[in-house]
Image: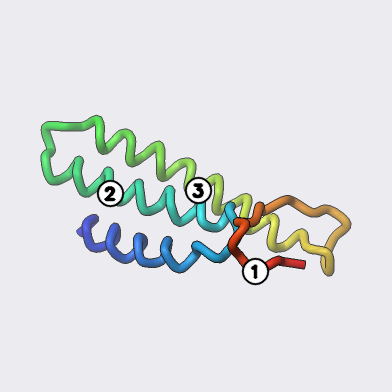
Amino acid sequence: MDLGWFVFSARLTICTIRSSIAFFGLFFTVTMAFLKFAIGYYDESNEVFIKVGGYFGLIASLLAWYNAIAEVWNIGNSDIRLPLGQFSWAEKMP
């Protein structure tokens, strides 16, 4: 099951290459969490991968909150702006 979610989230991660660094980081950490869970549950005697997957999941949740707040606090809604970062090859954001 986790391997299927890994493949799905890996494809979504590739789709975020031209987006912001924070959004790419979110999908990258989700993908790594599913990969670690898939490895950990495949060989249940190795709990380290499951714990590492959990840590990646926690980082992903923090990045998800950051992305959500940064998108709500935009120039049209607030005077506060949070940086999302931008790849050098991505289209320039306003």
Badge nearest the viewer, 2 or 1: 1
Badge nearest the viewer, 3 or 2: 2
Q: Quadrant of residue 94?
A: bottom right
Farthest residue, direction right: 79
Q: Are marks 3 and 1 in contact (CB under 8 Å)?
A: no
Whole-percent x and y of residue 69?
A: 68, 55
Whole-percent x and y of residue 2?
A: 24, 55
Tell me how many marks there are: 3
- Distance in Å between CA atoms under marks 3 and 2: 16 Å
Q: Are marks 2 and 1 in contact (CB under 8 Å)?
A: no
Label 2 environment density (alpha carbons within 10 Å; few <14, some 14–19, many ≥20): many
Establish if 40 lies above or below 73. above
Q: Relative to the observer, which residue lies in front, 76 or 93?
A: 93
Task: Name the residue rendered at 42%, 61% in the picture.
Answer: 13
Label 1 environment density (alpha carbons within 10 Å; few <14, some 14–19, many ≥20): few
Whole-percent x and y of residue 8?
A: 32, 66
Q: Quadrant of residue 6?
A: bottom left
Q: Is residue 78 left or right of residue 41?
A: right
Task: Name the residue rendered at 55%, 45% in the picture.
Answer: 62
Q: Which residue is mark 1?
A: 91
Q: Is residue 28 left or right of residue 41?
A: right
Q: Which residue is mark 3?
A: 61
Q: Relative to the observer, which residue lies in front, 62 or 15?
A: 15
Return the disc, 2 or 1, that comes first in the chain's sequence. 2
Badge nearest the viewer, 3 or 1: 1
Return the disc, 3 or 1, that comes first in the chain's sequence. 3
Q: Which residue is mark 2?
A: 35
Q: Dot 2: what SS?
A: helix
